[in-house]
Amino acid sequence: MHTLICHPSTPCPLPIELTANATRLVKGELQLGYILQGDIEQIQLPQKGKPIQKDHLWQHTCFEAFIGFEGEPHYHEYNISPSRCWAIYAFKDYRQTKPYQPSHEPTIQIIQSKDQLEIKVILPASALPTLLVNQVFKVGLSAVIESKDRHKTYWALNHPFDTPDFHHPRGFVLKV
């Protein structure tokens, strides 16, 4: 697991830690894992429900992954809510969306206790950017954490700028 860092412009007043990882699976899927530890009761969490596709998840507590390739401008964005709602977006270049409709939904597992929230996601191969033979994914793992008092903090493996920006390729630092 890799430690996500809270962006300095949005300091977190809660005693929490966030780790995440991405792993390629044998059948071409990508497994994402997030573990949020600490005072979970102070975090604004949506009620769990059926997994459905939904936009604007990033406006509240949401776990995210950005996946692209070295030297390529196109990438995909994945949003996973603790409610089990999800969204997948495709971009042809930095913040330039392109039409995309996923053919398969991710598998989402939520495990919660008093002091830990664990999110496990399996992205089917059909929902990932198209790979060339032996091509390596560049991944940016991130999250928006909203406290019960509606304060939002922005977490990522790397924050390349003075303001949070999960879309910039300089944030895609994990090679998978």
Image: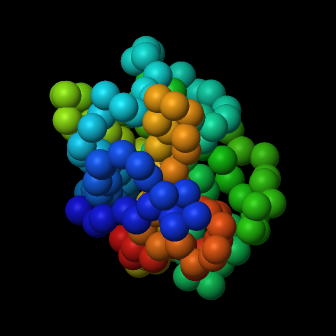
Image point (55%, 41%), residue name: 151
Quadrant of the image containing the N terminus: bottom left
Q: Position of residue 67 (x, y in %)?
A: 53, 63
Q: Is residue 68 visible?
A: yes
Image point (67%, 35%), residue name: 56
Image point (58%, 78%), residue name: 160
Q: Is residue 87 above or below residue 44?
A: below
Q: Is residue 84 visible?
A: no
Q: Which residue is most to the bottom?
A: 71
Q: Camera-side residue: 142 or 78?
A: 142
Q: Quadrant of residue 36?
A: top left
Quadrant of the image containing the C terminus: bottom left
Image point (66%, 47%), residue name: 89
Q: Position of residue 53 (x, y in %)?
A: 59, 27
Q: Camera-side residue: 52 or 141?
A: 141
Horizontal side of residue 167 vs 140, given as left or right: right
Q: Position of residue 63 (x, y in %)?
A: 46, 45
Q: Is residue 171 above or below residue 79?
A: below
Q: Camera-side residue: 98 or 103?
A: 98
Q: Is residue 3 above or below residue 62?
A: below
